[in-house]
Amino acid sequence: MDPRLLLTGFVILGVPAVVIGYILVMERLLQFAPTRIQGHIRPWLWLLPALVFLFVFLVYPTINTLVLSVHDKTGKNFIGLANYAYVFSTGDTLTSLRNNAIWLVLLTFLAVAGGLLTAVLFDRVRYESLAKSLIFLPLAISFVGAGVIWRFMFDYRPAGSAQTGTLNGLLDSIGIAPVTWLIDAPLNTIALIVVGAWIWTGFCMVILSAALKSISVELLEAARIDGATEAQLFRNITFPLLLPTIAVVSTTMIIIALKAFDLVYVMTNGSFDTEVIANRLYKELFNFSQPGRASAIAVILLMLTVPVMVLNIRSFRTQEAIR
Amino acid sequence: MDLNRGRQALFAALAALALIVAACGPSGGSASPAGSIGVSAPPATTGSSTEPSAGVSEGPTVAPSESSAASPSGGGQIGGTVTVIGVWGGSEQESFLAMVKPFEETTGIKVEYTGTRDLNAVLTTGVASGLLPDLAGFTPGLTAGFVESGALKPLDDVLDMATYKAETAPALTDLVTVDGKTFGVFIKAALKGLIWYNPKVYSGGAPTSFDALMQAPASGDTKRWCVGLESGAASGWPATDWIEDILIRQAGPEVYDKWVRGEQKWTSPEIKAAFETFGRVVADDNVFGGSNAVLTTNFGDAGNPLFTNPPGCEFHHQASFITDFFKKQGGAADGDFDFFPMPDINPQFSGAVSGVGDLFGMFNDTPQARALIAYLVTPEAQAIWVGRGGALSANSKVTNYPDDVSKRSAEILASAKIFRFDGSDLMPEAMNNAFWKAMLDFTKDQAKLDAILGELDDVQASAYGG
């Protein structure tokens, strides 16, 4: 038998066995402790494996990244904030910061607005689940796959040749000259964001749709009896009640926009002013062997994400509290 | 709690723990049971794939007469596997697999090949994590770094160095010699700076001067040039070849070498002149489809308009490997294409050519990897790829070129007065990458040349050494 299969078997059976074994051993040891303090120790003992994992795979790498970001590419010589100075003075990284700002605004807007629109509209049709599945489908495609698909969509051939790209084919059929979607800035960044929105609209829709279903029918009925139009209904009842969910979905999309990488890497690799922070990080680390600079970029990315995450968690909590 | 049952559970848990520890241990330690010489760090990761088959090696089941001269192991089955990563896909991958097939049959070693265009990133990560293939292709510019980190293993006791050096051009072997030791071998070579044309379209013969080459054709619809720079994450590289070919003929090998080493500023007049010369080629009205087509056309498809009716262009500049693409993607047959070398620009540097080779190195010192690398440099092995077309051999003993075009390119390579390796491949990766991107930006908007060269100077200041 293939040893990799064997190893897989060991891991699948072994890891739960070790965890259960650990708990059994700890429970046994705990019996020797005075009954009074057992209750204080027990939760920590049960949490310990998770905390260890969290530390090894989250806390330690974060601290290490911080340390690396103030060192040169060998990771040995301390160079202060030089890596940060590099990030904020190089043309490419500045372009990537600007582009991420565009991603943040546009992707969040397109995906959330699209999700809201589809959620509200599909709520009123008979074939709702089918329509929702179709919108949700792109999320099931790997991002790299989506990037490749959309490269074909955006494909460009010189005017006069047969247009192989879907979009330029459509333009060609109505007599408009082909467009170089992925080459002309800022059109190319917008084109990439549209692909991102194509993927993420389904995600926003599903969450917003679930929130929509939880709005009580009586409320809407009462408003209708009072003579409210459907537009008023949406503006004064549905939308305000959806607002906390919209906030959560929006913050999630903001984080996704900040982390944008796959689509850019596959479709343009940052050429023609489409660079984004995460792709820049990848290049510095894997292509240029500059872990210091890459870490500095990672820290900046983290700094940008943290406030959004805090906001996200807060609004999630308030939502929970309301429930 | 029943004490007895508790004890049983405890024992079971401990036993499971012991099993896990045993399974996760450094299994690679026994990866190379015998014959492996001085492996300082056991290849723990790839070892797990090498181990099993090496362990069940069935001994020499093949009669000695069956093992050809190409087998470096002196006959007999070694068994096991060797993992290889390279940049080749499509027909190049097929040719490589055809090349190693006799090796697999003779030695019983299975060659597991993976192709990726993002090879440098895979290797750089691999060096940091220790997850490396046994053999891998890489660009010469990365040699020093890999040697320094100890990832690349010396080949001096793997190869018959006297034979290897006698059969390979010094211009190639020098590139991978660090502190007197050899760290890589060349699987195949390609000659750069060839101008391709369709004899049925262009019958003017080889232009005698560079200015004649650059002249626009008389007929309106057929442009002078076809250029395609798209190549996924490596987009832009075909234009770096242009700059190199122009620079070595215009400013000479000395400037070229200084430039490759990072001692020649990009904003210097020599480099700027090379960019401006290339700018004439990709000027909107001089190139098929205009500069937008240049940026969006894949390098492999770029030459196809040579063979369309009406033809899109007269000339296409590319290395010798492109014939394979002409035939398999452009629908061209032998006889539909021919070439002449790019003419001299400055007569002082007459006879200068640039070329490139596919470099391979050993990252895990296993008997299987040693056997494969020793096999790959033999004329018998290299003749296989050469015979399939699209490649020149790095080995001077190989002469079985299947067509006139590759025979002539091999002769040019062998008789070059001044030979230089592809400069961008020798530059640090950050420089090379910025160079690719600069070529895209310049092609898109030539008016930005000074700003683009200024940015390249900035990259140059930080990419080398520090």
Image (cartoon, coloured by chain):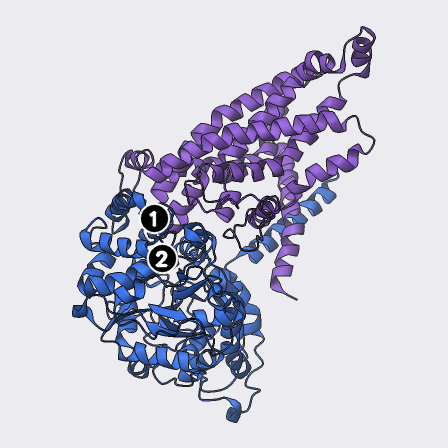
Chain colours: A purple, B blue
Residue lying farthest bottom? B65
- For the residue marked with disc 2, what is the amino acid? Ala
Is B189 on the left or on the right of A171, as rendered?
left
Graded by Cα atoms within 10 Å as few (under 14), some (14 to 19) or many (20 or more), the crowding at tag 1 reads: many
Image spot of residue B168 (x, y percent): 31, 79
Determine the secondary structure under disc 2.
helix
Q: Earlier in the sequence, mark 2 or mark 1?
A: 2
> Whole-percent x and y of residue A243?
64, 18
Q: Nearer the viewer, residue B126 or A164?
A: A164
Give the quarter of the figure containing the N terminus of chain B.
top right
**Residue that appears at 39% across and 36% down:** A95
Q: Is residue B31 visible?
A: no
Q: Could you say which disc has been placed on residue B239 in the image?
A: 2
- Callouts 2 and 1 on one subunit: yes
Q: Chain of mark 1?
A: B
Q: Secondary structure at mark 1?
A: helix
Which label was assigned to residue B442?
Answer: 1
A226 w.r.t. A315: above or below: above
* Residues at discs 2 and 1 in contact (Cβ within 8 Å): yes
Q: CA distance from mark 2 to mark 1?
A: 10 Å
Percent x, y for residue A22?
Answer: 62, 41
Q: Quadrant of residue B224?
A: bottom left
Say whether residue B86 is left or right of residue A8: left
Outermost residue, top direction? A226
Name which residue lies at 52% across and 57% down. B25
Give the vertical position of B105 relative to B22 (above or below). Answer: below
Characterize the local packing of mark 2: few (<14), some (14-19) or many (20 or more) Cα atoms within 10 angstroms.
Answer: many
